[in-house]
Image (cartoon, coloured by chain):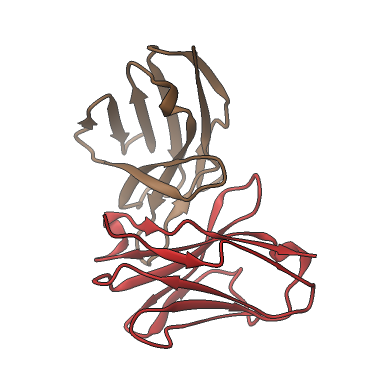
Amino acid sequence: RKEVEQDPGPFNVPEGATVAFNCTYSNSASQSFFWYRQDCRKEPKLLMSVYSSGNEDGRFTAQLNRASQYISLLIRDSKLSDSATYLCVVWPGGGNKLTFGTGTQLKVEL
Amino acid sequence: EPEVTQTPSHQVTQMGQEVILRCVPISNHLYFYWYRQILGQKVEFLVSFYNNEISEKSEIFDDQFSVERPDGSNFTLKIRSTKLEDSAMYFCASSERDRAHGYTFGSGTRLTVV
C-alpha cells in the first residue's frame, strides 16, 4: 500500500461547482496532515493544515478521519483559478520529512 | 511575504558533470530541506538540515549528493557525477519550527541531464 494515496483525476468541473478530493495514508501513527496546491511546473504551496476537528478556510474545508486514515478536501463555488493539482501531504512523525501523495488534478471550466 | 529563493531556475548539464543548486532560505528559519520531483511523479524527500548538520536523509540521498550551508544565508545541494535519471525539479524549503507546521518552498531548479 502506498504511503499516501490519491485519485490522480483529472476532475473536470464547471465554475461554481462543489468538488471533493480524498486521500488515504498507510501509517496510523502519522502526526500532521496538510493540503498543498501545485500549479503546473511550480512549487507546492501550503493550502491548509488538517485537524481532527475539521477546519475551514473560506471556500475550502478539510477533514481528517484518523480511524479510517482518511483526509478530505472540499472546495465550494469553484473558480477558474482553483485549477491546479492538490497534494495530500502527511508528516509520519519520528523524523523531519513530509510524505507527498501524487496529487489530484482539478480543472475548473466555464 | 518572505520567500525562499533558488538559483538557477533551469540548469542543463552533461552526464557525469557536477552541479550545485543554490538556495537562500527565509532568514529566521532554522530547518532546511531539499526535495525533488521527477516530471509526472510525486514530490520526494531528499534531506533535511538543522543546526549545521544533516538531520535526516532518504534512500535517494546517496554518496552522489551532499549539502552545505557555506555561510549564514546560502544552502546548497551538490550532485556529483550526474546521471540521466537525476533530471527533475529540485525544490528547496525551509521552516521556522519543525515540520508539523508546514514548509515554504522555493520556486525550484529544473535540472536537465543530457
Chain A painted colour: brown
In the picture, residue B12 is in which quadrant?
bottom right
Q: Position of residue B52 (x, y in %)?
A: 36, 85
Q: Residue at x 41, y 79 (%)?
A: B74
Image position of A109 (left or right of A92): right
The front one of A13 and A93 is A13
Q: Residue at x 36, y 69 (%)?
A: B25
Q: Is residue A21 visible?
A: no
Q: Position of residue B80 (x, y in %)?
A: 68, 81
Write the residue at 35% across / 57% down.
Answer: B104
Looking at the image, residue A62 sits to the left or right of residue B83; the answer is left
Chain B colour as displayed: red
User: Please, is residue B94 above or below residue A54 in the view?
Assistant: below
User: Residue B95 location, x and y as percent?
Assistant: 30, 64
Q: Where B5 sits versus A47, above or below? A: below
Residue at left offset 70%, top offset 61%: B87
Front one among A8 and B91: B91
- Residue A30 can be seen in this image: yes
Image location (x, y in percent) of residue A31: 30, 52
Locate residue A17: give its quadrant. Answer: top left
